[in-house]
Amino acid sequence: MIATDIVPVELGARRYEVRVGPGLLARAGAEIAPLLRRPRVAVLTEDTVAALHLDTLRDGLAAEGIAMQALVLPPGEGTKSWPHLARAVEWLLEAQVERADMVVALGGGVIGDLAGFAAAILRRGVRFVQIPTSLLAQVDSSVGGKTGINTAQGKNLVGAFHQPSLVLADIDVLDSLPARDFLAGYGEVVKYGLLGDATFFDWMERHGPALAAGDRSLRQQAVCRSVAMKAGIVVRDETEQGERALLNLGHTFCHALEAATGYSARLLHGEGVAIGCALAFDLSARLGLCAQETPGRVAAHLAAMGMKHRLADIEGELPDAEALIALMAQDKKVVDGRMRFVLARDIGKAFVTDDVPPEALRALLDEALTQRRR
Ligand code: GLY
């Protein structure tokens, strides 16, 4: 039996723990009970996750005498929207969730972001527990307190920083993920190595295939190391005034590609992150910032994992370089009209810059789009 690892997020009075290990859903009652003022919680989840995990959570809570009410929302990005936020908040009020009660987010990034935001605005803020059920949510979105919804104007444009009181990352739930979703989440794991920990990237090159094949111990190590990196960055820069922007490695490209593919199943977010990381290293090499062979090493690992890593791996039509650049310019990371990129001097040495010559960016995208047509 693998023991639970605890990664603290040291935010003073708002300190919390990310607990990573097997069987946490079944033990949720014992894990959460010390935080409760009364033995009841309100759970927000979605259909697919509810079918797989809600009974285990209910039993785990009941084992400690904790009652549970659940609102089961539709799966998919469309749930991170005003109508579902309104529904969730009104349901929480009807369920008489009080200021001192606990909301539980059981699901992937969509549910975590929506439930966290609902908790942030309900009665001017109630506490919540994240129980992330996707790899992406375990290593990224459940930690750090970014919550919110999408609007017609773009993704994540409405939201709040609201830190959870506890995160339970149950390694067992990763077994129920389709391979494509698992690998998309792994795109965010690779991101951590690339942005700040070359030793972690070496480790991934050695262990990635076994981890993807299902090795629980390796999965737990990958989640812990990713969460520890994120926790460190969040503690130093909670509201993204500086260092936290490094977590956006690959994201300027990714957001443009997601918009170009209509936020559809053609490209999952984590797939866009992996392709975006590969492009960020290509651009870094093109600008003479990192060694010419470094992008090849990044691409080789993504390819060895069977992951999408080039524009050529996205099915269907893509707009031309000009149109992709226009989509990048709409990203919310634009400051004073200048696009900000996370580039790298080497694996593990990322930095933020707004100094990217437009012609280098256009040449990179033109070439990547031409490879698609070959
Ligand atoms: N997902 C990026 C961040 O939490 O800052």
Image: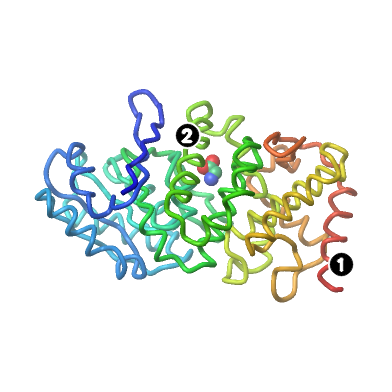
Secondary structure under tag 2 reads: helix
Amino acid type at circle 2 is Ala
Amino acid type at circle 1 is Thr
- Which label number is shown at residue 231? 2
- Give the residue at x 38% y 69%: 74
Crowd class of label 1 (few under 14; some 14 to 19; many from 20; radius 10 Å): few
Question: Compared to 187, does 369 lie above or below?
Answer: below
Crowd class of label 2 (few under 14; some 14 to 19; many from 20; radius 10 Å): many
Question: Compared to 169, does 184 lie above or below?
Answer: below
Marks 1 and 2: CB-CB under 8 Å?
no
Q: Quadrant of residue 44?
A: bottom left
In the rendered image, residue 350, in percent from the top left (x then y), is placed at: 70, 36
In this orientation, which residue lies closer to the viewer: 192 or 216? 216
Q: Using residue 206 as the reference point, say whether residue 90 is left or right of it.
A: left
- Total tally of numbered discs in the picture: 2
Q: CA distance from mark 1 to mark 2?
A: 40 Å
In the rendered image, residue 270, in percent from the top left (x then y), is placed at: 58, 57
Q: Using residue 12 as the reference point, say whether residue 291 is left or right of it.
A: right
Question: Compared to 269, does 5 lie above or below?
Answer: above
Residue at label 1? 370
